Image (tube, rainbow, N blue to C red):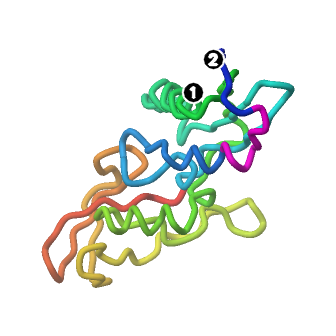
């Protein structure tokens, strides 16, 4: 997607664009930005064009068109003349790319963030599922209800201490 608009400032930097992209929320979990979710992989200024490379959380993610449009909208509102959003599927997105700020935002929203890295140091195997503390009361006395929660990237748990069900953002 390429959009042309008049620019207000010809000295825009990639770092500045990345900061502006913190204003783009994930459509499914609006408390986390696409930057903190880790789907913004690169920002490059090429001649007068701003190229933003994103990786979906999974290849069939229904929110990608909305995310692309929101990225363009935010950058247009900042006066960027030319915006190009590129989608790349390789390497595949991983929860390892989430920021700590993003994980804390998930927890504050009532979603338990990933408890471990998705891939071990060798990059070959996954670790076993960790004990998932309740985002409401912090108890580790929780139980898996379903491998899938409100979306495919989350599992449904119930806290045995406070009785509340909650989503766990699975490491992947």
Q: Which residue lies furthest to the left in this view?
A: 163
- Helix, strand or loop at disc 2? loop
Q: Nearer the viewer, residue 107 or 96?
A: 107
Question: Horizontally, is 160 left or right of 126 in the view?
Answer: left
Instruction: Find residue 159 and report its horizontal and vertical position in percent.
Output: 21, 74
Look at the image and say whether residue 107 sits in the magenta stretch. Answer: no
- Say few, some or many: other residues with alpha carbon within 10 Å of mark 2 (under 14 / 14 to 19 / 20 or more): few
- Please state the horizontal and vertical placement of residue 143, each as a whole percent of the image: 27, 72
Highlighted range, magenta:
10-17
Residue at 46% across, 75% down? 130
**Which residue is disc 2 drawn over?**
5
Percent from the top left, x then y, of residue 23?
A: 49, 46
Q: Residue at image x 75%, y 61%?
A: 123
Drawn side of residue 25 relative to residue 99, left or right: left
State the residue at coordinates (63%, 43%): 40
Q: Tell me if mark 1 has few (under 14), some (14-19) or many (20+) residues whose alpha carbon lies within 10 angstroms of its own.
A: some
Give coordinates of residue 14: x percent, y percent.
75, 44
- Please tell me which of labels 1 and 2 falls first in the chain: 2
Label 1 sits on a secondary structure element that is helix
Residue 12 colored in magenta in the image = yes
Q: Taking 79 as reference, is 125 above or below it?
A: below
Q: How many marks?
A: 2
Asked whether, in this view, residue 115 is left or right of residue 159, the answer is right
Residue at 66% over, 43% down: 17
Q: Are marks 1 and 2 in contact (CB under 8 Å)?
A: yes
Q: In this view, does 130 lie above or below 60?
A: below
Determine which residue is flagged by label 1: 76
- The quarter of the picture where the C terminus appears is bottom right
Please state which of residues 120 and 111 is positioned toward the viewer in this rendering.
111
- Disc 1 to disc 2, C-alpha distance: 7 Å
Q: In which quarter of the image is the N terminus?
A: top right
């Amino acid at each position: 997607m390429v959009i042309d608009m008049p620019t207000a400032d010809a000295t825009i930097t990639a770092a500045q664009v990345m900061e502006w992209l913190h204003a783009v929320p994930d459509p499914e979990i609006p408390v986390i930005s696409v930057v903190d979710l880790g789907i913004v992989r690169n920002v490059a200024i090429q001649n007068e064009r701003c190229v933003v490379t994103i990786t979906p959380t999974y290849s069939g993610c229904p929110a990608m068109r909305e995310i692309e449009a929101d990225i363009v909208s935010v950058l247009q509102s900042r006066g960027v003349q030319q915006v190009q959003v590129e989608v790349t599927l390789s390497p595949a997105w991983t929860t390892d790319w989430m920021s700590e700020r993003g994980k804390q935002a998930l927890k504050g929203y009532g979603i338990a963030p990933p408890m471990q890295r998705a891939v071990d140091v060798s990059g070959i195997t996954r670790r076993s599922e960790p004990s998932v503390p309740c985002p409401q009361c912090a108890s580790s006395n929780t139980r898996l209800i379903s491998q899938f929660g409100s979306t495919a990237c989350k599992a449904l748990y119930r806290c045995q201490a406070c009785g509340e069900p909650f989503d766990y953002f699975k490491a992947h």
